[in-house]
Image (cartoon, grey):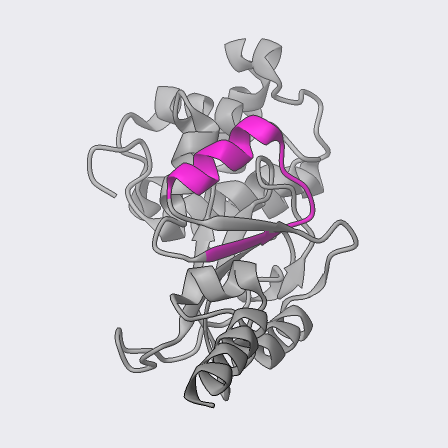
Amino acid sequence: MSDTPIASREAALRIALAARALNGLDVRALVGALIEKLALPLTEAKLGRLTVEDLRVILAGDFAEQGCHVGVEGEVLKEAVRLLWGQGLGNKDFPTTDAYTEGEMPGSLRVAFAANRGETLDGHFGSCERFLIYQVAPDTIKLIAVRPTVEADTADDKNAARSALINDCQIVYVQSIGGPAAAKVVRAGVHPVKKPDGGQTREVLIELQGRLTSPPPWLAQIMGVPAASLARFEEEMASEEAA
């Protein structure tokens, strides 16, 4: 992540989880406050040097007017600092990715999910903490990446930055997405699919897998193959012509 406020996805993850621990603190305000304290770029090493008192001063400073909380309990501050240090990330609903080599699943789809906790579709496109990225073939599902959105949220156009974060995917599942954001997602070459009730990502993907061999028109277009209904029609036409 060169030329950006946050030096790595690991650092971005730490900041996102710390913001959530701080009673849902505004991420952009926290990033700004950390930059004021630590200077650019925000690295894992710099975050690892923060103390509880440092964080207390940050939250009580000028950034309080930009969404930072003042008077956070001591134990909450300690938890946030531990997360900024990188401690306990494995216990914070952060799923483990599967081993994957680019190109090893020919003909597969890359699918993103707006998520906040675990392998769950539970996020709005514009506010989810992360995107889970899966590679999906008819017989295989692999979670190949987890992409925190905190850096995208520091951009002037947050929705465009979030769209760029998943522009290597063909589909993104969200609980909700606004019209302007959806237009930017489509412009990035990604097809948004709304599932307001959310659910477990792998259950959604198993349902998607079942459609890969006989895709409806919208999915066929993404896959670059004839839709199942059109294929049947074409077969009937060919049979009639042969007769």
Residue 166 image position (x, y, % from top left): 41, 50
Name the residue rendered at 20%, 33% in the picture. 3
The residue lying toward the viewer, choosing from 122 and 212, is 212
Whether residue 218 is visible here, answered yes or no, is yes
Does the stretch in magenta take in 129?
Answer: no
Quadrant of the image occupied by residue 32: top left
Q: Is residue 97 left or right of residue 18?
A: left
Quadrant of the image occupied by residue 21: top right
Q: Is residue 99 left or right of residue 86?
A: left
Does the stretch in magenta take in 174?
Answer: yes
Name the residue rendered at 42%, 23% in the picture. 157
Question: Relative to 45, does residue 107 appear above or below in the rendering?
Answer: below
Residue 102 image position (x, y, % from top left): 26, 73
Residue 48 image position (x, y, % from top left): 38, 46
Whether residue 150 is visible here, answered yes or no, is no
The residue lying toward the viewer, choosing from 85 and 122, is 122
Q: Which residues are magenta?
A: 171-188
Question: Relative to 145, does residue 59 appear above or below in the rendering?
Answer: above
Q: Is residue 189 left or right of residue 73?
A: left
Where, quadrant-wise, is the N terminus in this rendering?
top left
Name the residue rendered at 53%, 21% in the picture. 57
Residue furthest front in the image: 243
